[in-house]
Amino acid sequence: MHSSLKRALAGALVVLALPAPFAAFAQSGLDVSLTARRVAVDAKGRETFAPATEAKPGQVVEYRAAYRNPSTSSLREVQATLPIPQGTEYVASTARPAQPLASLDGRTFAAMPLTRKVKLSNGQVVVKEVPVSEYRYLRWSLGAIAAGSTETVTARVRIAPLVAAAQPSGR
């Protein structure tokens, strides 16, 4: 797996790589596989899927993480963590199973929507929702996975707009 998304300059395509931090979240004893597929809507309004080896800004990609227990005994207290790669933004309410915890840093997880305290110019402190575009990880508590069983989690991300790189001035 590659460490991040690589941006292709020609044609404004994003070449997708599965997020490397994903491997760090694989629980011992589990076989974990991560796939990505591009989501589109056909002329009849039905969703269609294609392998997501590349995508354009604004397109939606669905990540599917399958956690398989190859052992002969149950694994307990399984936590499934899915990184949201840089260059993408989590699409709200697309996580399955519903209601995972979210994180901005991969260490602290809380129920969605995430909030933060913000100090206003008048000195007042208020609590505001963190935009989902800032979410970097989702985590599900799957409980036990029986021997030979697989549990799958999914979430969708939107490819963020490309930011133009600074051009040399030529001076």
Image (cartoon, rainbow, N blue to C red):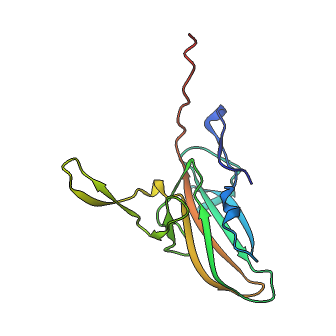
Nearer to the camera, 60 or 6: 6
Residue most extreme to the left: 122
Closest to the observer: 11 or 30? 30
Q: Position of residue 3 (x, y in %)?
A: 69, 50
Q: How many labels does the image show?
A: 0
Residue beneath the point at 53% across and 58% down? 136
Q: Which of 156 and 72 is in front in this view?
A: 72
Camera sees residue 4: yes
The residue that appears at 56% across and 30% down in the rendered structure is 165
Q: In which quarter of the image is the N terminus?
A: bottom right
In this view, the residue farthest toward the top is 171
Left or right: where 64 falls relative to 119: right
Quadrant for residue 30, please give it. bottom right
The location of residue 7, given as percent across then percent down, is: 64, 40
Question: Which residue is at a point 27% across and 53% down the rendered structure image?
Answer: 119
Name which quarter of the figure residue 32 lies in: bottom right
For residue 25, above or below residue 124: below
Viewer can see residue 96: no
Relative to 126, is 115 on the left or the right? right
Residue at horizontal 67%, vertical 61%? 22
In the rendered image, the vertical position of residue 45 relative to residue 59, given as above or below: below
Residue 74 image point, x, y percent: 72, 88
Image quarter of the C terminus: top right
